[in-house]
Amino acid sequence: MLALTRKIGEKIIINDNISITIVDIKGDNIRLGIEAPRDIKIYRGELYDSIVSENRQSASPVDFAKLDLLKEIKKK
Amino acid sequence: MQIKSARFGTLDIDESQIICFQNGLPGFNGKKTFAFIAYGENSPFAFLQDVEEPNLTFVVAEPFSFFQDYSFKLEDEVVAELGLSDDNPPGIFNIVRIPEKTGEMTANLLAPIVINWQTRNAMQLILEKSPYTVRHQIFPQGISEQKTKGGK
């Protein structure tokens, strides 16, 4: 992993079209300003990880016999 | 086309049932192409079967049958990326997780799947600043009571 030291107001540039500015630092909290094209998806890491984890658990093998219960359920 | 599923055996799938996640699904980045298999006529449930990996099947549910107030904003970028319009409303589904007890199954309302049925492009969104979580009980009163209610 590349580790860079930055001060408030300084930036890093990624791939010519993404810039990340250190906006503020208060104690443990660092506020970042991110400028990127609109089609670049930006998520908080823990939020993204929670979706990865839930998707993986949902894909684990399902005993489809258990789904017979759902047969009679209709759209409302 | 024919695809193989560990759950369903060999399936003959019409092209109109094939959907493509251009950006992949979080946690399954190489997996982009799935067959959408309805569970039955008028069922809110369906399956997403990976066309190349027989062992990869998701259960999904149309949320509004269970969560009448479910809503989120479709951001302009999503509408543009998927090519949605007022004349072409999206299909909305949520991935279902089925634990040991089927009745305790949950839906991931924080990360809905949005499908453009005309182009058959799909995305799994991750909602920001949302009141929803990855686990909402589909049958909070138990699955059998839900059935009885539906039968009346």
Image (cartoon, rainbow, N blue to C red):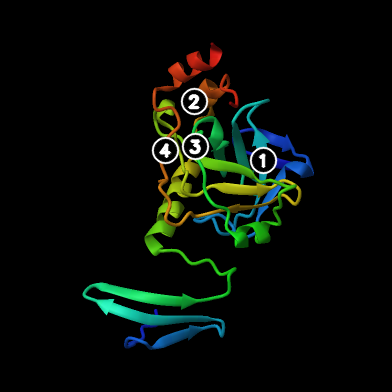
Q: CA distance from mark 2 to mark 4?
A: 19 Å
Cβ–Cβ under 8 Å for marks 3 and 2: no
Q: CA distance from mark 4 to mark 3?
A: 13 Å
Q: Secondary structure at mark 4?
A: strand
Q: Amino acid at mark 2?
A: Lys
Q: CA distance from mark 1 to mark 4?
A: 22 Å
Cβ–Cβ under 8 Å for marks 1 and 4: no
First-in-chain label (4 vs 3) = 3
Q: Residue at x 36, y 81 (%)?
A: A22
Q: Amino acid at mark 3?
A: Asp
Cβ–Cβ under 8 Å for marks 4 and 3: no
> In the rendered image, is residue B56 in sight?
yes
Q: CA distance from mark 3 to mark 2?
A: 28 Å
Cβ–Cβ under 8 Å for marks 1 and 2: no
> A27 left or right of B121?
left
The crowding category of the residue bearing disc 4, from other C-alpha atoms within 10 Å (few below 14, some 14 to 19, many at least 20), is some
Q: Position of residue B69 (x, y in %)?
A: 49, 37
The residue pinned by badge 1 equals: B36
Which quadrant of the figure contains the N terminus of chain B?
top right
Q: Amino acid at mark 4?
A: His
The residue pinned by badge 2 equals: A66
Labels 1 and 4 in the same subunit: yes
Q: Amino acid at mark 1?
A: Phe
First-in-chain label (1 vs 4) = 1
> Of circles 4 and 3, which is in front?
3
Q: Residue at x 56, y 85 (%)?
A: A16
Labels 3 and 1 in the same subunit: yes
The residue pinned by badge 3 equals: B69
